[in-house]
Image (spheres, rainbow, N blue to C red):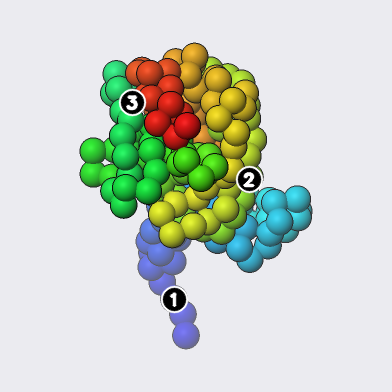
Amino acid sequence: MVIPLRFLALHLALFLVVLASPVRAMTEEEQQRCVWSCLANFGPNTNPAYHECVKDNCLAGSNSTGETAATSKPSVAAVTSRWSAGTTFDGKAQYAGLGDADGTYGFYYLCDRQGRSEIMLVGLQGPAATMHVTVDGVDFPHTFEKGSGGHTTAIASDAPLITALSRGSAIEVRNPSGILVIRYGLRGSSKAIATAIASCR
């Protein structure tokens, strides 16, 4: 069977167009889920297979600096948003923090009079992992355990990270692969954190 040259040329052209088509960049939320999947299947994050999984499956839309090309609006609250303090919904703890208007994501300090003192990340997917919490460029890595309300890490109320949160201007949280998952301003954080801690004494 002889295939016309014109037919072959047309299909070759279509194939090249498909190859040249840009791959849709993942949103940061999609990348986060992808990274958690790699961690669940190939963890811990010191395993080279984990990093290969992330590189091959989760970073297709990244630029050369390692930052994701796409942005995820739900994980980024305006720098002008003010931190608040109060009592948790169940009345069992005090909080200081900031979250998105729809409650999808959030960063909170929680404490109570029984000695509870922790940071909670709301809205992330996946198992326990070491997250990099950065305040004004200073990194405070902490291992966050998965709980019913979010991912939490125990922390003393006078820990360096709590002090930095009270004095800083911006906070970023990155997953083990360096992908940004949360970025918030720290306006009002000093008063909010002090109020929560005072209420837990």
> What amino acid is labelled 3 in the image?
Trp
Q: Residues within 10 Å of mark 3 (few under 14, many from 20)?
A: many
Nearest to the eye among marks 1 and 2: give it.
2
From this view, report whether residue 54 is shown above or below residue 185. Answer: below
| Chain-order first, disc 2 or disc 3 | 3
Locate residue 44 relative to residue 199 in the image: left or right.
Answer: right
Q: Is residue 119 left or right of residue 74?
A: right
Q: Position of residue 57 (x, y in %)?
A: 56, 55
Query: What residue would you read off at disc 3?
Result: 83
Secondary structure, mark 3, is loop
**Picture quarter containing residue 128?**
bottom right
Which kind of residue does numbered mark 1 sit on? Ile
- Given residues 63 and 156, the one toward you in this image is 156
The residue at 63%/45% (across/down) is: 143
Choose mark 3 or mark 1, whichever is in front.
3
Determine whether label 1 and label 2 are within 8 Å by CB: no
- In space, the residues marked 3 and 1 are separated at their CA atoms by 69 Å
Q: Residue at x 60, y 33 (%)?
A: 156
- In the picture of the structure, the residue carrying the numbered disc 2 is 143
- Which of the two discs, 3 and 1, labels the residue nearer the N terminus? 1
From the top left corner, tell me how far across and down residue 201 is, in percent.
47, 32
Q: Is residue 18 visible?
A: yes
Amino acid type indicated by mark 2: Thr
What separation in Å lies between label 2 and label 3 (alpha carbons)? 23 Å
Which residue is tagged 1? Answer: 3
